[in-house]
Amino acid sequence: MLGTALLAGAAVLAIILVLRPPTSSSGTAAANGTEVAQDLGTQEQTEDGARAAAQQTLDAYAGGDYGAFWDRWTTASQALMGRADFIRMHTECAQPAQGVRFVVGAVTVTGTTARVGVTRLIAATTFDFTFEDGAWRYVLPAEQQAEYRKGVDQIVQERKASNQCGRDALKLTPVPMPTSSPDAPTSTAPPAAATKVGQPVQVGDLTFTVTRVEQGAQLKEPITNKPVQAQGQWVLVHVSVTSHASKAVPILGGRQTLVDDQGRQYAQDDKAANYNMGDLALTIKAINPGQTLTGAFVYDVPAGSKPTALELHDYAQADSPAVRVGLN
């Protein structure tokens, strides 16, 4: 898949808006558990197929169609919570931002898995999908898997106690994202400008400067100090970001994509970015007027691939052309 100050609450909002699944027209009818799961049909095992499936899946949640959303989970995810229980959970504890659409960004397909970069208001994250039984299916994040094992009654009780239901969860002033029709295509316009490492480039209210690129970087979990393994190799793009806005705005690391020498695009791995203790994690980080922050975007790319460009996107205009920074 938003008063408290924006900067202080951004991390909490990301969990509320992005990590917790949407309510549904068919969801109400399915509350008794009698409705049959959807037939998702045949989908393409391609980047475009994964992108379309991810948008449809997240649109179901955002629109409140919890039954249809559950139908698009993997078998393993569905085993953690039944369809009727999932609908009941959202009936008793409504999502705080129903109707606010998710915006699917970069999609990376590796075999039967897809990593999908997503933003919703100021929150950004990466979701996993698996190609299973001829369709791209949503994989519950590890945090949700652990929570769902508690059972619906305990989850609802805990969420209500921590004001995570409905309007009680909306404690922040949202940064509006542009609205678009569910069928509106993503802009295919070429990058609006080009620059290179060390040269500043303005993207909306923010100026980015790529300072260096680190291939084959090593990441470790902050508590256990164990190495965090990439599927391929970690690439860190170190940047400084300066705000020219009149209020706090998000950097939205999940919208900034890496391009390799084969033209493939990669979404930031937000979880890995938080493991990069040497730099500020540029995930949903908000930046204040006139402030400059330094950090790194973190990507998992196939071993042997060569990063050639970073495509930067405006947080406030979902369909604006990317601004490309050459990394050669």
Image (spheres, helix red, strand yellow):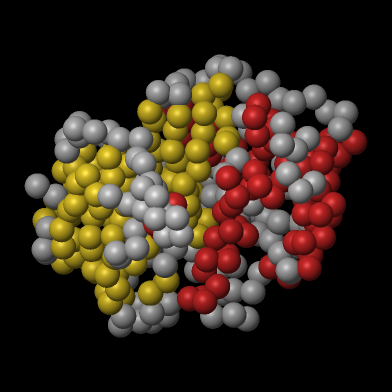
At which x and y percent is residue 202? Answer: 23, 66
Q: Quadrant of residue 249?
A: bottom left
Q: Residue 270: where, in percent of width, then height?
A: 42, 53
In the picture provided, is 179 more to the left or to the right than 283?
A: right
In the depicted view, which residue is nearer to us: 62 or 251?
Answer: 251
For the residue pair 99 and 180, the one nearer the viewer reads as 99
Q: Looking at the image, which residue is at 24% across and 33% down?
A: 303
Q: Which is nearer the eye, 139 or 317? A: 139
Residue 211 visible to the viewer: yes
Taking the spot 80% from the left edge, 24% from the top edge, the residue there is 36
* Residue displayed at 81% across by 54% down: 154
Query: Where is residue 307 shown, x and y percent of the image?
Result: 19, 42
Say above or below: 9 vs 78.
below
Q: Does residue 256 appear anywhere in the picture?
A: no
Where in the figure is residue 234, as x and y percent of width and height? 28, 45
Q: Does residue 221 appear left or right of residue 53 in this picture? A: left
Q: Is residue 188 left or right of residue 59?
A: left
Q: In the rendered view, does 167 fall on the left or right side of 219?
A: right
Number of callouts: 0
Point 69% across, 61% down: residue = 96
Camera-side residue of 126 and 195: 126
In terms of image quadrants, where is residue 264? Answer: top left
